[in-house]
Image: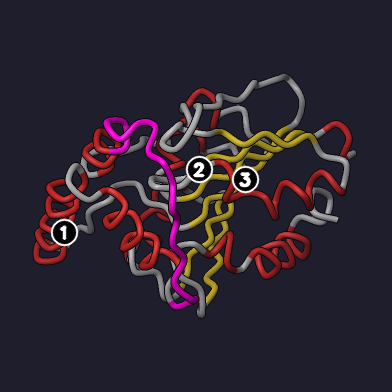
Amino acid sequence: MSSEIEVIAYHGWGFNSTCWRSWQAKFQQQGFRFQAFDRGYFGNPMNVNFEQSPKIILTHSYGLHLCPIAHLQQADLLIIFSSFSEFHPEPELLKRRSQAILKIMLNQLEKSPQLVLNNFRSKCYSPQPKETMEKTFSNLELLINDLKDLGKTSISFDKLNHIPKIVFQGGKDQIISFSQGKALLKLLGNNAQYIEIPDAGHALPFTHFQTCWSVLNATHAAYFP
């Protein structure tokens, strides 16, 4: 069965395709075809080819919004890590705070992009050790525009009701709150499973790869042998 299945992965804002290396190695070891989308923040952009074979789609954070809805509809299994329907939380006080932080990031991004990126990724990986990323920005304008879009983007999930979905949320996520994860789950409908990893942060598919894989093996063994 695995030889007939392809896996497609979408990274989030401030990341690139290399974040999926552990997943790629494991899937390819099992005989799956693996593709990783790359937005092109730090190198050449890389699109993915959608074929008519059964497919698993992995998305991390903003990656859920980078994947076209028409492509999400083709998933036989959609795995969502640390994501959201709308980035800013609903309670007004928290929303204003989130908007203010995003505005500060945007103001600083043109002047000190590496500092902004390292601070962001440090929060993503917390409570794990600080992870920095010394990269050449090949498309800083795209990084800025996507950060602006992140603050206003939203998805209608009506067309995804028939697709089995698994939502992973880190219990110590400093980017996406617990309430946002639950709000996303509610919008995804009855055909969605919610899994919280208590000691994980926003970067949970990368810091807790083996834990995620073990969970998926227990719930979807046909895909994750």
Does 139 sit above or below residue 22?
above
Please name the predominant secondary structure of the magenta segment in the image.
loop
**Residue 82 horizontal/vertical position (percent):** 45, 58
Disc 2 or disc 3, which is closer to the eye?
2
Q: Is 89 situated left or right of 132 in this image?
A: left
Identify residue for label 2.
16
Identify residue for label 1.
101
* Residue 175 forms part of the magenta stretch: no
Q: Are marks 1 and 2 in contact (CB under 8 Å)?
A: no
| Secondary structure type for disc 3 | loop
Identity, as a three-letter code, of the amino acid under mark 2: Asn
* Residue 130 forms part of the magenta stretch: yes
Q: Is 72 situated left or right of 105 in this image?
A: right
Q: Is 68 situated left or right of 122 in this image?
A: right
Q: Earlier in the sequence, mark 1 or mark 2?
A: 2
Q: CA distance from mark 1 to mark 2?
A: 23 Å
Residue 191 seen in the current view: yes
Q: Is 51 situated left or right of 95 in this image?
A: right
Q: Earlier in the sequence, mark 2 or mark 3?
A: 2
Rendering colour mode: secondary structure
Disc 1 or disc 2, which is closer to the eye?
2
> Which span is picked out in magenta?
127-143
Write the residue at 25% across / 33% down. Answer: 145
Identity, as a three-letter code, of the amino acid under mark 1: Ile
Q: Earlier in the sequence, mark 3 or mark 1?
A: 1
